Image (cartoon, rainbow, N blue to C red):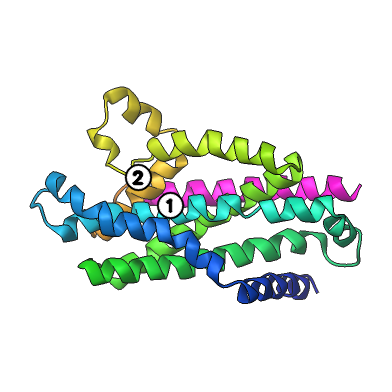
Amino acid sequence: MRFRHTMLFLGHELGILRRNPVWPLFGIMQPILYLLLFAPLLTSITPNGTLEEALVMFTPAALVMIALFGTMFSGFGMINETRNGVLERLAVSQAWRPAIVLGRVAKDVIMLVLQSLIILGVAALMGLRVGLPAVGLVLLLMAAAGLFAANLSYGLALAVRDENGMSQIVQFFLVPLMLLSGLMLPISVAPDWMQAVARFNPLYYAVEAGRALFAGDFSDGTVPVAFGLFLALSVLTLTWSLRSLRKLAG
């Protein structure tokens, strides 16, 4: 019954996307533009100055961008449902309450994986060549990162319940997290103090692990750290969002 309720909410959310398929495409335009226009500039800092090396360096960062700028803003729709009383009625219905959040999170992760495949396809057309095991592990890592970001977004939406307030909070934290993750340039070229601070940024480990996997270094220490970190953060943020939903239902 719990699984069925989750699938019902997932189907509802996917139905909304089918009626408005253009929005997910807009969500990946920025990473694609960065791939096309920014990644070639990185050839000057790669060992052999090739575009393939630049793509190995930047493609994982483009995937993290989707997790950041896509799933982190998914909670705004829930704020509108809270204001209109829709979410409160669902929360006190006979439906399994966690399914209200889990169905939405599942939709966000599915869309993130599909968008990531498109990004990987564009990178492959540009000259990226990586093995299937590396691609599979990176997709799993991006799914874990998206799971964390979606849970955090819905938790914020249920706690703040105001679009302006949530927007300010998200923007306040997104910029330093992005700059200290090495998205645009490897954090190794940054000053020592920035490298030290970056170690406290979970996105840093996602980017570095993705680059290590694409480079074929499956034994790199950032890989297990990234997976463990985002799985733990996903559990914590999911617990927080479910508790916030329980408070909404009274």
Q: Residue at x 74, y 70 (%)?
A: 9
In the image, residue 226 lies in the stretch drawn in magenta? yes
* Image coords of residue 182 (percent x, y): 33, 41
Q: Secondary structure at mark 1?
A: helix
Q: For this rendering, which residue is in front, 58 or 138?
A: 58
Q: Which quadrant of the structure image shows residue 135?
A: bottom left
Residue 59, can we see it? no
* Chief secondary structure of the magenta portion: helix
Q: Amino acid at mark 2?
A: Leu
What residue would you read off at disc 1?
A: 65
> Dots 1 and 2: beta carbons under 8 Å?
yes
Residue 190, can we see it? yes
Q: Which quadrant of the structure image shows residue 170?
A: top right
Q: Residue at x 23, y 34 (%)?
A: 189
* Image coords of residue 112 (percent x, y): 50, 63
Q: Which residues are magenta?
A: 222-250
Q: Residue furthest left?
A: 48
> Which image quadrant: the N terminus?
bottom right
Q: Residue furthest top?
A: 193
Q: Residue at x 62, y 65 (%)?
A: 106
Can you say whether 186 is above or below 217 in the image?
A: above
Q: Which quadrant of the structure image shows residue 8?
A: bottom right
What residue would you read off at disc 2?
A: 183
